[in-house]
Amino acid sequence: MKPLRLAVVGFGRVGQICAELISQSHDLSLAAIVRRAVSASGKLPETLRSVPVITHFGQARDLDAALLCVPTNAVAEIAAQILQHGIPIVDCVLLHGEALEAHKQVIHKAAVHHRAAAIVGAGWDPGALSVFRSWFALLTPGGATETRHHTGISLRHMAMARTVVGVKDALCAEVRAPDRSLQRYVYVELQKGADPDKIAHAIRADPLFLGEDTQVFPVESLAELEEEGRGVVLDRRGPPGRFGHQHLLLEARFDDTVLTAQVMLAAARAIPQLEAGAYVLPEVSLTALWGERAEKAQREWL
């Protein structure tokens, strides 16, 4: 089967990750990167230097779909332009509820008119997390769902580590290893000229960490570290009754941009199996999202 030829529209962080993931894929091909004229001459990563950069879709050839990696407020207009060429689209708009439904209806009308398929809101949230929410509700009708978002790892400032000579600031995280044992990760922002090995030894030798698996990581900026990564807890509790009190729990830590890119690629794989019109991710079959790998996935995961 020939790889699907995709265009990435927009080259911010989501667009860059989509492009890199496509370039590493066996069933997808990066046919073009679409950028604004003012940034079209911008330098690409070395792995993408051979990919054509275009500024409008009149220059595109033989595309199977376009991934819209642009701000939400720009998606509808760009989608309309692309659908006019009969090219299917995948977007990752950050809309929920009635706003997402209204966006879908606008895209659906254009997609049907131009006989192309579109998958909207195909990111982490909405998108993959919407599928998890839907399944949890399906399994526990009448229950209640709580969704709690948090940073990727639980970090706290370490007064002890700050007392070590050469440490400007420090954060500590507790992480479960694969064998369920507790590990402590200590991130230290060092003062200029400080010796990271001596500082790591001093922290591990402190009574607070003696006898524990403690990893010490020097970082350039703790402020940036605290912003990295995301996490979510999806907590679904079924109603009490004679069938028992069901409790479903999903806890995840992730880079939401990377997961959004992965969802967009999965959605692109499903496009050839869809009729003209707009869809949200829960309306697309899991088999379709696997693309040509569906048969193998069924053997492995069913």
Image (cartoon, rainbow, N blue to C red):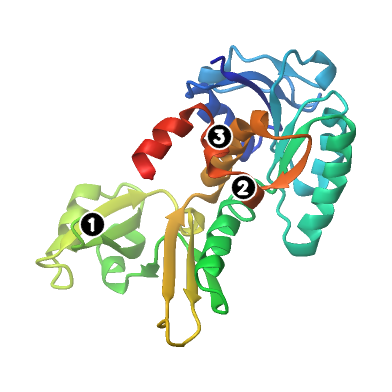
Based on the displayed image, in which of its 4 quarters is residue 146 positioned? bottom right
36 or 273, which lies in front?
273
In front: mark 3 or mark 2? 2
- For disc 3, the neighbor class at 10 Å (few under 14, some 14 to 19, many from 20) is many
Which amino acid type corresponds to the residue marked 2 in the rendered image? Gly
| C-alpha separation, residue under disc 3 versus residue under disc 1 | 28 Å
- Element assignment for label 3: helix
| C-alpha separation, residue under disc 3 versus residue under disc 2 | 13 Å
In front: mark 2 or mark 1? 2
Q: Between disc 3 and disc 1, whose residue precedes?
A: 3
Instruction: Give the quarter of the figure containing the C terminus.
Output: top left
Counting from the top left corner in percent of width and height, residue 140 is at 51, 73
- Element assignment for label 2: loop
What label does residue 123 carry, if any? 2
Residue drawn at the location 88% of the way across and 38% of the way down:
110
What label does residue 177 carry, if any? 1
Counting from the top left corner in percent of width and height, residue 180 is at 21, 62
- Element assignment for label 1: loop
Residue drawn at the location 37% of the way across and 50% of the way down:
219
Counting from the top left corner in percent of width and height, residue 114 is at 87, 30
Q: Between disc 3 and disc 2, whose residue precedes?
A: 3
Identify the residue position indicated by label 3 in the image.
Answer: 17
- For disc 2, the neighbor class at 10 Å (few under 14, some 14 to 19, many from 20) is many
* Count of numbered tags: 3
Q: Between disc 2 and disc 1, whose residue precedes?
A: 2
| C-alpha separation, residue under disc 2 versus residue under disc 1 | 28 Å
Which amino acid type corresponds to the residue marked 3 in the rendered image? Ile
Q: Are marks 2 and 1 in contact (CB under 8 Å)?
A: no
Residue drawn at the location 42% of the way across and 75% of the way down:
247
Q: Is residue 272 left or right of residue 175?
A: right
